[in-house]
Image: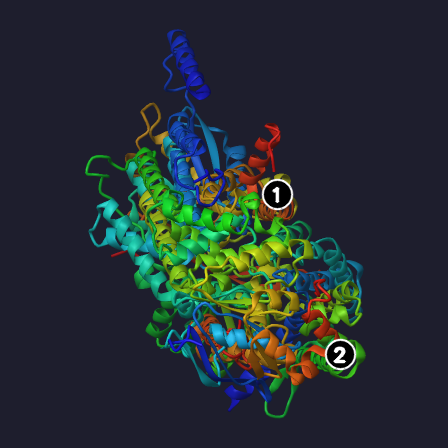
Amino acid sequence: MTALPSDSILMRHGVRRGEVAWLLLAVACAFVFPEYLSVGTSVLVMVILVLSFDLLLGFSGVLSFGHAIFFGLGAYVAGWLSLAGWTEPISAVLLAGLAAALLALVLGPFVLRLTGLPLLMVTLALGVLVFEAAHKATGLTGGDDGLSGIRIAPVLGVFDWGLGGRTGYVYVLAWGVLIFALLKRVVSSPFGVALQGIRENPGRMRLIGNAVLPHLVLAYAISAAVAGMAGALFTQSNAFVGLGVFALDTSVDVLVMLILGGIGSLHGALIGAPLYMLLKHFSSQWNPFYWMLLIGVLLIAVVMFGRGGALGIARHAWQGLRGGRR
Amino acid sequence: MSALAFILLYGISYGLVLCLIALGLVITMGLMRIVNLAHGAFAAMGGYLAITLMQQQGWPYAPAVAAAVVGVAAIGVLTERLLYVRLYQRPELDQVLVTIGFNFVVIGVFTLLFGPNVLSITLPPALKGNVDLGFREFEVYRLMTAAICVGVIGVLWWIFERTLVGAKLRAAVDNRTMAQAMGINVPLLLSATFALGCALAALGGALGAPMLPMEPMWPLKYLVLVLVVVALSGHGQVRASVGVAMIVGIAETAGRYLFPQFGAFFIYLLLIALMVWRQDGLFVPRRAAGVA
Amino acid sequence: MSTAVPALEAAGLSKHFGALHVTRDVSLSLQHGARMALIGPNGAGKTTLVNLLTGVLKPDAGRLRLFGEDLTQASASRRTRRGLVRTFQISSLYTELTVFENVFIAVSECAGASFDLWRPAGKRIELLERTEALVERLHLHEDMHRKVSEIAYGRQRLVEIAIALAMKPKVLLLDEPAAGIPSNELHLLLGAIESLPAEIAVLMIEHDMEMVRRFATEVAVLVQGELLMSGTPKEVMSHSEVRAVYLGAAGTERFEGKVLAHAA
Amino acid sequence: MKNLLLRAAAVLCCAGTLAFAAPAGAQEPIKIGFVGPYTGPFAVAGQSFRQGIDAYRAIHGDTAGGRKVELIYRDSAGADPTLAKRLAEELVVKDKVAMLGGFYLSPEVAAAAPVANAAKTPLFIVNAATPALMKMSPLFLRMGQAINQPAELAASYARQSGKSKGYVAVADYGPGHLVEQAFMARFAGEGGQMVGNVRIPLNTADFAPFAERIANADPDVLQIFLPPGAASVGFSKALAARGLTKKIMIIGQGEAEDSDLPLFDDSIVGFKSIIYIDANATNPENAALSDWLKKNAGANARPNSFNIGAFDAMHLAYKMLADQAGKPFNGEAAVKALEGYSFKSPRGPVTIDPATRELVQNFYLREVVKGEDGVKRNKVIKTWERVQPVAMK
């Protein structure tokens, strides 16, 4: 058996240097910028959410404008659990992921039959519908006021959630590493390879005997589970959850982050979310509409000229430096 | 009885404006085979342009609207030549992303130029006030808008069904390769169609400004409604879109009137149910199951 | 003819779209290891027949059996899993993936691995080795790690066949495999087809008479959705109706090998 | 790494200066963090917060209780309560602020409550108006209103004006629901009959169906509550088109402030609204604020609920610092000491209600009139003096 090139979709397993570097950087941030840990935590939560979206869009080719429903459901499940007295955080994250996955298993068989504009419209409509329903169900969601008074027990019974957010940062980072490793496992598996086949040519997959819909539904459920876990982490690290978690903006932001970072490798999420939030932070002095202008131009530029987002650009630059082939 | 009259009058006048905007999108999407989420931006440009001409240049209403339509058609051709040409061969995802990006840019520019607030259009005195229809009062403005929409849709209908240009257009919407083989200058046709689509959008945006007031977020806020019409019409189904737009307009109005609490739900539930039931469009005969 | 159960047996297949009858009462049977060609003029309904056989379309009437098992109502993917595999007239591949990855997807699917979420694909040595073997069998090793969209069209056709073989077909339908292949690459295709395992029954839909002559032991002629006749190539050729309807004088010449150039 | 080095250097420097300087406590500036929407859809409010603060400091100086006061502003941009919470946390942890202020939306306050409670930091709610917020922390002081107050006054006023058939139309979100409940309860409680109510979804484009419903119910007074901007303009047009503006009394809150009036056509004339400030009041505090705004924030800048709220927040901040001069700042004690405190605000005389930590203040009924110069403005037609906030259960 001759060796496969390292950039083959069959060779996604194994730890890359870049991944280790990213983790070291994330840990270093905790020491270098201790005042910004709560911002850092929210960046990490978004990284996890974008990872989940990459499985869906980048690997399975499902363009959804309703990803926030899973993030939001997970966030509220964590909130409800806490208010009901279930303050243990780790199990709450798992339960939130489970709830989101179940919702995806229910919706998936209907939604994933569609492609193109109908798929886009139905996921968008689902997103809006869930938002409106959450808005109406003030008894469950707290309406515009959200759920406050959320208490979270110390992580593993030891690490207390004080002001400053060190516990939150390390906790979310640990979840991020775990989830990344699991997702990586999934996308490197024959299942992950089949998903990429479905993304490229679903009709052909069917004709080689692949059960396309079940594959997509499973991918949808995994993606939803991760999004739900991100939602739970969001609630736990903020000790608050409001309707914003269901907002269409969340779905669109996630899409933009993924595209900016680079699609279909899981690594784009690691870069895209921090990049987007950093850009947003530094342009926060501006009117948010200038921010839209900036993001619009970036989006067009990345798609038209810089295929592969920040990751793709970096890779090209690296190959250029090394006088690379291809 | 009065409820029914209200729902029909307001629903149809609302649906007609939607129809005008959506028709532009149905034609361009049908012909160009791209997912164009930037259509709302052109409609909003129409509204803003008309308002600017009236407020800053002191133009009267009718010429301002007409000039806005022509102006946006020109912007449309420019955009098509510079941006959309590069998208025809791209995957759907790229088209979605670029057109969303275009929306963001347009929203940013609107805010820069016009500020974040609503800009209202001043109607000429003749269009203000109500007219007595015998069974109830009705806004002159809505009546006039409905009449213009019916007129424009009628003319389009005539062009599509009765003229050579229309035949070519239908042929190209149906089967672009075939049209090319028949010697139709497709690039020119694409530009012309895009201009037509943008002109319709701009007309809808300018005429509809009192119903759907101009604000920077307009392109995204009302895009969903327009897309609902397009998605339910089915691919390139120009005729179906008229019917669908009426249904959406009436359903929206009825939903908000009869169930104001859940009015916002109504249209989305309808969309999801119909799309899952018939993803090719409402009035499209179902294709034989499983055709690749 | 052997008396064993035929590999593939179609009986009385009919299909119409509206008033247009595209397939009328077609019956044919492929024995184990058969090499049959299906010929017919443009618009004879050859592709519709292939779609009916593979389950892309459902027939209005008629039955289909694979090794005696009734698959008339089975979905395309079920038929594929049963060993009824096809290639496409127009290449339908995963164009952004490499040749190796294209074949691997089919190998993995056939091995039932596509629901394995845990073991990395790159460590499934048995799958990788089978993929490599198929790639080599079709002489694709040079292009193995290039994207399908970047290789020559003729070689893309070979990838099609490699994918079909990866699915361990018992009955293989080749839908105009030579379409679009430049003549200087045709020998690769012919070589590949000639080296197909003998036990596979092959039905080839083809225009190119040179291909048919070299490949087929049986020929079936489809005209206006109806099976005009079938028999050995010689029998078919000597049939006056076939000549009249389909081949014409020029066709006869080509069939008899006087014109060898490939016709598009 | 660089940061660590810098910090080490800073510590060394401080240690060095300590040896020479007088005891540091009195000299060290005290910081106040202000979280507000300085950009985005509500930027007008955030910028007004800032104007109010700048005006106060221009008039009253930048020291209190012998210490220099520093302001730190953090932008909560759109509607993101978790961002507001994060900013509050950052202000407390990193910038070590002694007090927090601002907060445009109620959920922002709800999200930030644990921060104030954990750090014992007094927090001025300048705008957010949900009554229940005050229960979340004993460190909250509200510079605005509880949103039910003007709705109840509107109901009473309508009854006193002889209106008997009431209708409420509110935006379908938390504050809207509160206005609806308050108006309906008070109107019915005073013998009126509610003929209907409707909640208008925030994303509504065409308001005609709502106007139609209202007209069909045939009320003689309509309480509305909608966000300013697109919704208010659209709704007012729909009401006019259905002939309601001329026919019935319409009372709102902040839908048509003077700065927004150019967006409306003349059908808005006659629209009534109730709010706790009067931009044209002639008291010296308001005159001073008004002057400063005209000179420093543009000729069109007027006192509004946001800049007056921030102005008063600064007044209370200075008061707390003066109360605790010479001591390390204790937030809980400082808030406690303010209970029952009265002062003169640009909005008129106010007292901090000891039971609720809300303001006892005047409310003003205004009506949109069109002047001879063709400019529309809000004119006060009635004043309720020293309205007592309702104690929470």
| Image coords of residue C1 (percent x, y) | 45, 77
Q: Which residue is mark 2?
A: B167
Comparing D168 with D91, the one in front is D91
Q: Residues within 10 Å of mark 1 (few under 14, many from 20)?
A: some
Q: Which residue is mark 1?
A: A306
| Image coords of residue A173 (percent x, y) | 35, 37
Residue D129 visible? The answer is: no
Q: Residue at x 39, y 32 (%)?
A: A23
| Image coords of residue D85 (percent x, y) | 39, 43
Say which amino acid is labelled 2: Ala
Q: Secondary structure at mark 1?
A: loop
Q: Is residue B204 left or right of residue A150?
A: right
Gap in angstroms between the C-alphas marked 1 and 2: 40 Å
Comparing B231 with C186, the one in front is C186
Q: Secondary structure at mark 2?
A: helix
Q: Is residue D253 left or right of residue D178?
A: right
- Chain on which label 1 sits: A
| Image coords of residue B224 (percent x, y) | 55, 66
Say which amino acid is labelled 1: Gly
The image quadrant of residue C158 is bottom right
Discs 1 and 2 carry the same chain letter:
no
Q: Is residue A109 left or right of residue B3?
A: left
